[in-house]
Image: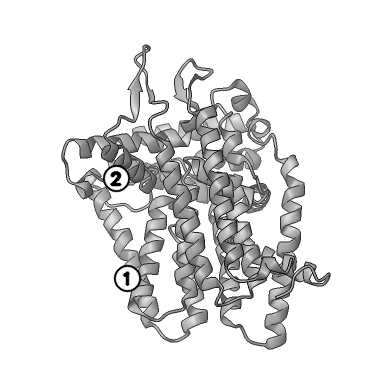
Amino acid sequence: MKNFSRGNRAVYIIILFGIIISFFWSIYNLNKFDKIKINYEGKLYNQLLYADLAATWRTADKFKKELDQGHNFFLSIPNYERFLLPSLIIGYYYHIINKDIYVVLDKKEIVVKEKNFKFNILIFQIFFYFFSVYLFSTELKKKIDSTTLNIIIFFLCLEPSLLQWHSSFWSESIFLSLMIIFFYLLLKNSKSFFYNISIGVLIGIMFMQRAVSFLYILPVLIYFILIFKKNFKPFIILSISYLLIILTLGYNNYKKTDYFYILPSGHQYNSYYHYFAHNLLADRKNLSPDEAKKIIQNEEREWIIKNNINLKSMKDFQKNINYRNEFFLDEILKNPIYFSQLFLKRAITMSIIHPFWANQHFYFDRTNPEAKNNPKKYYNKNLLKNIPYSIFIYFFTVLGVIRIFKEILLKKEINEINKFYVFNIFSILYFILVAGLWGNPKYFAPCMVSVCFFFSVGFKYTFSKYKFFSN
C-alpha cells in the first residue's frame, strides 16, 4: 500500500486504466446494442438510442441539416426544447464527417442508422472526461494528501455508476466532465477576472448540457460567500458571465419561436404536473390514480378550449405551462404531507446507487405492456440488488462527513479544502431537491462526484487505523 500513495504515478495509472475499461465497454455496447429493433407497437427503433435519447438525435439531425445547407452555425442552433448541447455536439460531428444520422427503411419509418461512426463520439466523451479528472487532480493535489487524492481519483475513474456513462450516449458523461472542470476552477479560489468569468460561463454551458443545473449558481454563490466574504467583485463577475449565457439562450429561443423563455419548453411542459399531479389529487380525494388523471386531463382540456389556446403558438404553449405549474403548486399546498412523503420516498429511490443503469436501459421498452401496467416493477427490477453496494458507499461517506465536521469544530475555523467539502454538501442537496421527485438513479450521477470526496476521507480514515495507508 505504500507505493500506492507515492507521487503522481498512481493517478496516471488509474486514469489510463479507466480509459481502457471505457474503451472496451464502448465497443461492447456498440456491438451488442447498435441494432434496429421492433417495439411492442410494431415501430422500429435503434436499441442503443431509445426513449429520451431519440429526442436528442432528432434535434441533432435537424441541426445537421441546417449546417449541410450552408447556414450559419449560430443561426442554425435550435431553440432549447429538451436537449441542446448534446444535440449540437452530435449534429456537428455528423456534419463534419458528412454522414447521415437516420435511414428510411421498408416500412417508410425513419430510424437512427446502425454502425454509422458512433464510436468516435464515445471516444471524445472518454478522453474529455479523463482529461477533466487529470486537470482536477493537478489542483486537488495542492490541497490534500496523496493517499486521499488517489482514492478520489480511483473513485472518479473506476466507480461503476460513474464509469458507465462514458460508454453510452446519455448526457451524463459530458455533464460530469464539465462539472469536474468546474470543480478545478472552483478550487483555484482566485479573485481574477478570468477564473470567475470562466466559472459563470461553465455553469451556463452545464445548463445547456442538462437543464437540471439551471439554478446551480445558488450553491456556488454560497461557496463564494465562504471564500471571498465581503469582496463583491467575484460575485458580480460570476453573475454577469452566467447571465450572459442564459440570456443568449433566451434570445435564441425568442428568434426561433417569437417568445422569450429560458427553461427548455419540453421539460417545462412534461414536468412535475405531468407525472405527479394526479397522485396528489388521488390521495386528497381518495380516488384511484387513473380516475384522478382523467379528471385532470378533462379540466385541462376544458381550460384550453375556454381560453382559445393554440398549442402551436409558443406564447399560448407557455400559458398552458403556467396553468400546469399553478395547478401542481396548488395541489402541493392542499396536500403538503402527502407531497413530502412522496418526495422523500422518491429521493431515497434516486439515491440508491445503480452501477449499471445505462446498460439496463437498453432492454427497456416503454410500449411493453408490463411497463404500462406495472412501471414500478418494470423499471426497478434491480433496485434491491443495488442496496448492499449503496450501503457500502454511504457507510464510508457518512464517516467522511463526520470526520470533516469534527475537524471544523475542533479547529473552530474552516480551511480551504473544508470549504470546498461544505460546498459539495450543498451541491448534493441541490440536485436532490431539484431532481429527487423523479426517483431516477440516473439523476444522482452529479451527486456521486461530490460523494467521492466524503467517501475518500471516510475510507482513508477507517483503514489508516489499521496502517493500510501511509504518506
Apparent side of residue 359 relative to residue 180 in the rendered image (left or right): right
Q: Residue 130: give x, y in percent of width and height.
A: 50, 56
Q: Quadrant of residue 381?
A: top right
Residue 288 lies, with reference to residue 160, above or below; the image says above
Instruction: In this rendered view, identify the residue nearer to me: 25 or 219.
Output: 25
Q: Quadrant of residue 198?
A: bottom left
Residue 207 lies, with reference to residue 379, above or below; the image says below
Q: Amino acid at mark 1?
A: Ile
Q: How did the renderer colour the structure?
A: one colour
Report which residue position mark 2 lands on. Answer: 79
| Residue at the right extreme of this rendering | 466
**Alpha-carbon span between mark 2 and mark 1:** 22 Å
Residue 320 lies, with reference to residue 4, above or below; the image says above
Q: Residue 283: give x, y in percent of width and height.
A: 65, 41
Give the quadrant of the C terminus: bottom right
Q: Residue 260: give x, y in percent of width and height.
A: 27, 52
Residue 326 at least partly seen: no
Q: How many marks?
A: 2
Q: Amino acid at mark 2?
A: Asn
Question: Residue at horizontal 59%, vertical 44%?
Answer: 440
Question: Residue at horizontal 47%, vertical 78%?
Answer: 189
Q: Earlier in the sequence, mark 2 or mark 1?
A: 2
Q: Secondary structure at mark 2?
A: loop
Q: Secondary structure at mark 1?
A: helix
Instruction: In this rendered view, identify the residue nearer to me: 66 or 34.
Output: 34
Give the quadrant of the N terminus: bottom right
Residue 378 at least partly seen: yes
Question: Residue at horizontal 50%, vertical 74%?
Answer: 187
Q: Residues within 10 Å of mark 2 (few under 14, many from 20)?
A: many
Report which residue position mark 1 lands on. Answer: 240
Apparent side of residue 381 relative to residue 310 in the rendered image (left or right): right
Q: Are marks 2 and 1 in contact (CB under 8 Å)?
A: no
